[in-house]
Image: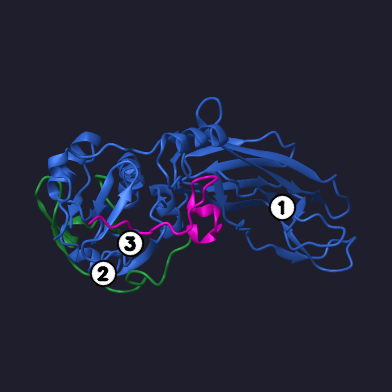
Amino acid sequence: MYCKGQLGELQRDLPLLKRAGLGLAAISYDSRAALRDFALRKGIVFPLLSDHESDVIRAYGVADRRYHKGAQLDVDSSGEVPVYGLAYASVFVLNPNGTVRWRFVSEHEEVRLTVSSILQRSLGQLANQSRTPLESGWIQVEITASDTSAGMGTSLTIGVELRIPRGWHIYGPQAGGDYRGIAWRMDSSQCSIVSDTEYPEPSWEQPAFADAKLPVYEGNIRLTREFVIRPMISDTRTAADRFRKACLDSDSRFPASGSLAFQACTDRECSPPQSVPLRWTFAFTPPDRERVPIELWRAFEH
Amino acid sequence: MVKRLLNYACFAILFPSRLVCGDAPTWMQDTVALGIPAGAKAPGFELPDQSGRKRSMASLMDRRGLVLVFFRSADW
């Protein structure tokens, strides 16, 4: 259910991969006929490869080890499906010489990476699709997101960027005592999960008024976090209603909010500590429950 | 006989997400115990695509490489 959404996202962002000079192919244990049906329905033009016997899935070490021969899984939307030879959701970025440059394998079948987050994590290439300046006074704060839409389980990167005017600095998160270090406050909730903040390395300097070295940032800095919309495991109407009520706003968008606290100082003086509210909203892509025609369903092993 | 796999041992009743019971930063992390490691030579392959055309790793490579995605199913 979640993977189908990922394939649509990959198709949509194919130009980003092309621009980065990377080819794309996706492999599953589905039959060629099932892949063909899906590709036609969803307009997928990049290669979907049918590894019906799961030989390649096993060679890459990503066959789901929970499922033995004859195993079946009860999928809410689809009933019992055969799952022997199923692949873990995973991404391998290969070098032109065929070695693995970067990889991401997840036991959580609902997690999926977008093209932007693959580019960001594998090549360190920023591919933010949204950037919003905030009302934050004379230290400019902008929020960024690797993607503008997301579905359940989509893992994306959100960021906060600050432009600190010349002659001013702010303190790193390591600052203690009377010095207010920068802090991006944002918690996981019943609707989403956020990772810890990645702060850049501060430089350690001693302003005239201080009696010890302090962690400071000057110029432009960028903080990032990974962000995932919590998937529902149960795919019932009640669960979907509950998700909508608890997690989506009145425009059916997915909001995420936090705050950024910091204090700006020069060598001689400090401005009062500031707290800037942060808010992202994402277009929400609902899970895809449509199946291939029944005659194309994967047969059970005997 | 229909076997039901107890796949989701950690079912949350209140909010139906497995994550509620072990809030997992593991979500954002690579499970290194699974799959071939970074730096390894990736196994070659030749598989049919949705239109029946055979595709090999070499034929899919672009100038900076190839993103190979394994997904669970395009059906369910």
Identity, as a three-letter code, of the amino acid under mark 1: Ala
The boundaries of the magenta stretch are B1-28
Is residue B73 something one can see in this rendering? Answer: yes
| Colour displayed for chain B in the image of the structure | green
Quarter in which the C terminus of chain A is drawn: bottom left
Q: Nearer the viewer, residue A205 or A295?
A: A295
Chain A: what color? blue
Residue at the image point whose x is 19% and y is 67% from the top: B44
**What residue would you read off at disc 3?**
A92
- Residue A120: x, y in percent? 45, 54
Q: Do the residues labelled 2 and 1 touch (CB within 8 Å)?
A: no
Q: Specify whether disc 2 shares its chain with disc 1.
A: no
Q: What amino acid is found at the position of numbered circle 2 in the picture?
A: Ala
Q: Is residue A1 covered in magenta?
A: no
Residue A45 figure quarter: top left
Q: Which chain carries label 1?
A: A
Image quarter where the N terminus of chain A lies is top left
Q: What is the distance, in whole Å, between disc 1 and disc 3 at their CAs?
A: 34 Å
Identify the residue under disc 2: B42
Q: Is residue B20 magenta?
A: yes
Please tell me if label 1 and label 3 are on a single chain.
Answer: yes
Q: Which secondary structure lies at badge 2? A: loop
Q: Within 10 Å of the Cα at label 3, are there few (<14), some (14-19), or many (20+) other Cα atoms?
A: many
Q: Which mark is residue A57?
A: none
Return the residue at label 1. Answer: A183
Q: Is residue B71 visible?
A: no
